[in-house]
Amino acid sequence: MLKFLIGILAVLVSLSAVSAETLYGTVKKNQSALIDKYGIYNKHQCIAGPIPKVKIKQQPKHGKITVKRAKVTFPKGKRCAGKSFATMDVFYKPDRGYTGTDSFKTSYSIPRGINSSEIKYRYKTYKLVIK
């Protein structure tokens, strides 16, 4: 099973217009795996923001990336229960029979604030072990 913590983004406030991070995970060979979710949600007001634009900046050498629109609904017993919002989900599928390491990079953009036209760019590098 994939060992990534799936991050669901809230509306973020930051001093920088650009940020980057590296995530590590394990994927089973010959299987597609959900790698990450990109979405904007204000958990204090229970409202969704615009869907981030996700781009693959560097393709993996030993697999394929698929980005699909999806929906997240908060479970009962949680703040915002029953509310949902759209995400962009990133899936990775290794080449058939491949085991070893692979990596890829994404970028995504989100508005800096609810009423702002200014865009904040973020970058992620994913380093995977395929077993």
Image (cartoon, rainbow, N blue to C red):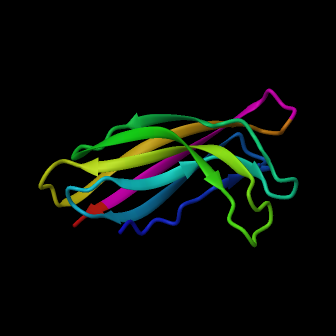
Q: Is residue 63 left or right of residue 53?
A: left
- Prevailing secondary structure class for the magenta stretch in the rendered image: strand
Q: In this view, does 125 lie above or below 112?
A: below
| Residue 88 location (% of width, % of height) | 55, 42
Left or right, residue 61 beside residue 112: left
Residue depicted at 71% across the width and 39% down the height? 17
Residue 126 lies, in percent from the top left, at 41, 54
Locate the C terminus and report the quarter of the image it occupies.
bottom left
Residue 124 vertical position relative to residue 99 in the rendered view, above or below? above
Q: Which residue is drawn at 75% across and 53% down?
A: 83
Q: Would you identify the image quadrant in which residue 78 lies?
A: bottom right
Magenta highlight on residue 126: yes
Report whether 80 appears left or right of 68.
Answer: right
Q: Give the magenta-colored segment's residue range.
A: 115-128
Q: Quadrant of the N terminus?
A: bottom left
Q: Which of 63 and 81 is in front in this view?
A: 81
